[in-house]
Amino acid sequence: MTVSASPVPPGPLLDVAELAKRFVVGSKRGLVARALSFSKPAAPPSLLHAVDDVSFTVGRGETVGLVGESGCGKSTLVRLINRLLDPTSGSIRLGGAELSDFRASSFAGNPHRARIQMVFQDAGDSLNPRYTAADAIADPLRRLKRMSGAQLKARVEALADMTGLPRELLPRFPHQLSGGQKARVGIARAIAVSPELLILDEPTAALDVSVQVVILQLLQQLKRELGMSYLFVSHDLNVVRLLCDRVLVMYLGKIVEHGPAAEVFANPSHPYTRALISAIPQADPERRVDRLRLGGEPRSPIDPNPNVCRFYGRCPKGTPRCAEEMPLLRPAGAARQVACHFA
């Protein structure tokens, strides 16, 4: 008897559409004002636009990089996708399932939880100090796969082997492990339930350079072996260039450029992307370019004017049109999009 595999749903694995997250700021002042005066209504609270109308896809087996300065909204975006935060509006579809229909507060027990997992920036901070390495790896298996006993023990040991964590370290607590060992525990925990999408939020930022290389090689190996898709967040543009199939460039809550990584790095279209790439250190003198230094201050993400380009004021190409008409993402080639009037 021949057993056929389950059909793979058509379309991308992850489809994010018009996703937005706004945080209320200054709400306490508004409450105080209303308590002191009932003669006139308090002004509505201001809103910080952390993620603003973001749309993109991640294909099956694809690695997509997400880059941008600190504070641009990357971490908020991945927390929304991983269902650690509820969106203000928009859609998050994973293999056809609408994840934004589920509240973040109750998603830990959702059947879809196993399909999307995350490796956090600092493995030490994300590990429970009261859990041994074995307990940390076993936790999602107990909760989401209802494993126990010998089956659970065998799976934990197999995951340790898969991630290069010596079995003799499984009884140890996080403070007894090195940075690289804690990173392996975090990765083993994330892949334990066989996710389809793995979100990597600066997975090597807290590690020594020599350890970073080993962990990145491990992640590449696991992707090949397990067939996962990666959403890879990193400040290290050289790593993104080497590991990612496509790249998303984010600035003040918006995607300003995306396309195949090789094309974006070779010929960036958006002025902000050009500034980022010009800052990459180059060992080869023939490949060095003059660094594009940006003047001015970033615009405030609080109640931003919807008609003004977010990069206006820092952009070397800025014109009065940029202060009157927000540029939208538009095609800039067969598989690229850029949000700039002059790209």
Image (spheres, rainbow, N blue to C red):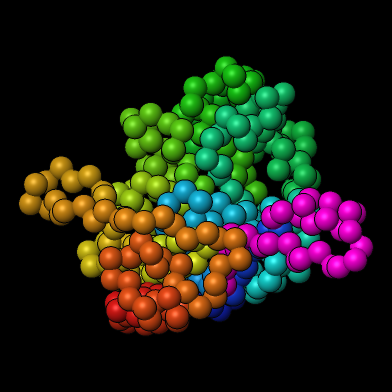
Residue 268, compared with residue 147, is above or below; it is: below
Q: Please report the residue visible at 33 percent of the width from the left and 76 percent of the height from the top.
A: 319
Q: Please report the residue visible at 57 percent of the width from the left and 17 percent of the height from the top.
A: 176
In the picture, the quarter occupied by the N terminus is bottom right
Q: Please report the residue visible at 70 percent of the width from the left and 43 percent of the height from the top.
A: 140
Q: Is residue 120 left or right of residue 277?
A: right
Q: Is residue 10 visible?
A: yes
Q: Is residue 8 left or right of residue 338?
A: right
Q: Is 85 covered by the magenta stretch?
A: no
x, y (%) of residue 291? 21, 52
In the picture, the quarter occupied by the C terminus is bottom left
Residue 52 quadrant: bottom right
x, y (%) of residue 120? 56, 42
Residue 6, compared with residue 146, is above or below; it is: below
x, y (%) of residue 82? 64, 56
Q: Please report the residue visible at 55 percent of the width from the left and 60 percent of the height from the top.
A: 301
**Foreground pick, 106 / 270:** 270
Q: Is residue 161 visible?
A: no
Q: Which residues are magenta?
A: 25-53
**Foreground pick, 217 / 232:** 232
Residue 213, compared with residue 311, is above or below; it is: above
Residue furthest out toward the left? 286
Q: Is 35 covered by the magenta stretch?
A: yes
